[in-house]
Image: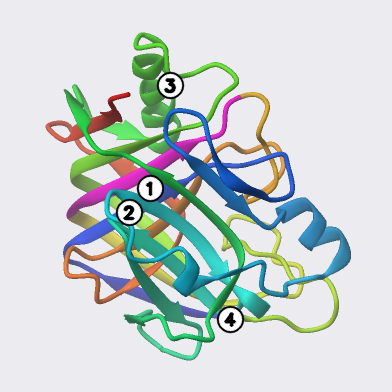
Amino acid sequence: MNVMRTRGWLTIAIGFTMASATIAAGVGPFGIEVFGNFKRMTHSGDTSGKVKLPDISGRSATYGIGALAGLRGEVLLWDGRIMVSRGHDLEGRVEPGIATDEAALMVIASVARWEELDIPTDMTQAQFEAFAIREAEGRGLAGSAPFPFAIKGEFSRVLWHVVTGTAGSTGVHGGSSHAQGHAQNRVFDQRDIAGLALGFYSGSDLEGVISHPGERFHIHAADPTFTRSGHVDEYAVRKGGKLLLPLR
């Protein structure tokens, strides 16, 4: 494991968990599509590709996160642009996807417009997630259905990693705060940074397919110029930022 402490700008992508295997067609008001199944991957060790990245790129106002086939890197989809951070890079640097890239796990959604809300105080990860759910519930977004959200502002800490590949038969996609199984990773620890966050909430019905069972948030990160990216394990936000909720 390679731990790096850095400072700078960061963009975070926070994903959601899903309880079904693969949903190829768009679901709900945000056209959610799911490829792969975290629980099944964990139990079977199957990290083969479930969707070709070129098939989901190029669609404007489309956002998502995932892991490369073989758990050999992370995937971020931002406004239709696919970005891949491969496990062999020592700094978690991003490169464009190539024609043969596939994802073992991938979740995407479409958002045309966002509503901005003030983040009223410094918050830990748990406090922010509770705040996001509360604000979403007030707008009819929470409950059993997943929804995307975003964050703009300062972060007091972001701990993130990039998976580097699998060994044996039970590869797991997760970081320093999660059981690793046979997945390997590089870990990066950033503090006092500004950035942008993209997130998804699972809803009560959709848990454990693209994140660990018992969790409803799955986080990825990248800087604003999309030069570095990875899966986030821990984070905290500062007062003065913005929570963005999707408009139907």
Does residue 240 lie above or below 63 as drawn? above
Mark 4 / mark 1, whichever is N-terminal: 4
Tell me which secondary structure the magenta stretch mostly adopts.
strand
For the residue marked with disc 4, what is the amino acid? Arg
- Which of discs 4 and 1 lies nearer the camera? The answer is 4
Residue pointed to by mark 2? 12
Mark 2 / mark 3, whichever is N-terminal: 2
For the residue marked with disc 1, what is the amino acid? Tyr
Q: Quadrant where the C terminus lies?
A: top left
Q: Quadrant of residue 40?
A: bottom right
How far apart marks 4 and 3 lie (CA) works out to 32 Å
Q: Which residue is drawn at 42% across and 89% down?
A: 89
How far apart marks 2 and 4 lie (CA) works out to 20 Å
Check disc 1 and report its element: helix, strand or loop.
Answer: strand
Residue pointed to by mark 1? 235
Does residue 153 lie above or below 29 as drawn? below
For the residue marked with disc 2, what is the amino acid? Ile
Residue pointed to by mark 4? 72
Residue 91 on image: x %, y %: 35, 83
Q: Which colour scheme is used?
A: rainbow
Mark 2 surroundings: few (<14), some (14-19) or many (≥20) residues within 10 A: many
